[in-house]
Image: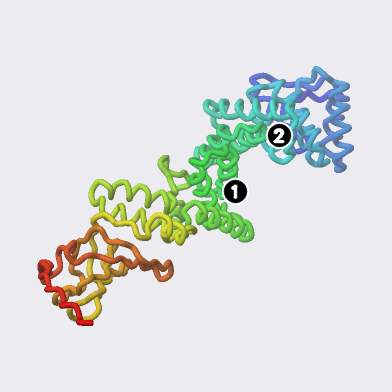
Amino acid sequence: MLKRWTQAIVVAGIIMLPALYGQEKKVKDQAEYDLIQAIQKEPDAKKKVDLVQQWKDKYPTSDFKIERLKAMIAAQQAAQNAAGMRDAALELIKEDPKDLAGYLYMNLLTLSMADKSEAALANSEKAAESMLELLKTFPKPANLTDAQWEAEKKNQQLNSLKSLAFVKMTRNDYPGAEAVYLDILKMAPNLADVSLNAATAVLRQKKEERQATALFHYARAASFSGPGALPEPSKKQAMDFFRKNYILMRENDTKIDEFIALTKESAIPPADLKIESVSMVMARELEALKQTNPQLALWITVKKELVGANGETYFTESVKETALPKLKGKVISHTPALRPTKVVVALENDTTGEMTLVFTPALAGKADPGTEIEFENGIPKAFTKDPFMLTVNVEAASLTGWPVATPAARPGVARPKAAPRKK
């Protein structure tokens, strides 16, 4: 006797509720009913796939097309046939574009299958975008609380975005992929693997000015702890990469802890993020110094060349025996203690001697450490790179700031010539 299908039934774990469709669904005949029952009872996954296919072949216009497609997805999943699942999911999307299940499975399969063929990418992109759009207005299922629905909706949005990012990365749309990864991190900042993927998307753009942003994501992925963190070996690998490249950019490891601390405040890098090299910082400061203290700026420029790889050559060819312009420094020490002939001065700071001034004649009196003096037309005579020291001959008359005035040279008195000896 034919049994009318008016109650909810289950096929391959998929609950079928005819009431959701606004009308009563019925089986075509007893054979369709029996076939559905057989599918439900079949324990073997591959046989279950065959039974669902029979259902489709024998009853192509069944009232239960949607339920049958979901049953096929479940059966193919049990049979570990990803391609079969994807085919059924695509058919489900075509049959009912407003059913979330097809998009859900497509997003999951995009990542698990990692099919990079253009046809697969096109289907994945469309499914992900359609799911995101559908979720904006999809009504809350009656069997879920508000909190449960918000959590589920967020989960499906994340899966859709991950699928979309995979498509963009595969197509080498790295700026597009980066933007999607940032959308994910705004929703779920604890996903360290997404930070790592964002770093890759930035690096592959091959823009030097974006390297700091890439290193931000690496540092974030490497230092994040708690749910969503990378496994320890992956964290170490990410941190090693970050530290190596930070030091290359910065030219040392200064401020590296400050940079890592910044990544712990947010998963999104600041828009104006930069890692300035020491050379860049020095160059900028030097330009500013030229406006406020041109003497010191000139000395820093000369010293930079002297301590460089070709310092000895630079000294010999460009500095030695060449009169220096007016310079200002602070006394570090002098010898002897009174009436010194040698005075060690610091020009760049108050503590480190950089230049030894040699005076002829000796200077009067003495000067306390820290005394500021100024001199000009010094003639460099010798140079050592380590420890750094430039030895310069200076005329005492060119010196200002010495505590005891240096007497002006007295005019020479003509001496009478000695009488010639008698032969």
| Separation of marks 2 and 1 at Cα, in angstroms | 35 Å
197 or 257, nearer to the observer: 257
Task: Please provide percent x and percent y for residue 418.
Answer: 16, 77
Q: Earlier in the sequence, mark 2 or mark 1?
A: 2
Q: Is residue 388 above or below residue 183?
A: below
Task: Please provide percent x and percent y for residue 230.
Answer: 60, 55
Q: Which mark is residue 15?
A: 2
Report the residue marked by disc 1.
Answer: 193
Q: Nearer the viewer, mark 2 or mark 1?
A: 1
- Image point (40%, 71%), residue name: 387
Q: Is residue 192 above or below residue 39?
A: below
- Image point (22%, 65%), residue name: 395
Instruction: Specify the quadrant that holds the N terminus.
Output: top right
Query: What kind of residue is marked 2?
Result: Ile
- Image point (50%, 54%), residue name: 246
The residue most toward the top is 61
247 or 256, nearer to the observer: 247
Q: Is residue 1 above or below residue 75?
A: above
Residue at disc 2, secondary structure: strand
Task: Please provide percent x and percent y for residue 163.
Answer: 64, 35
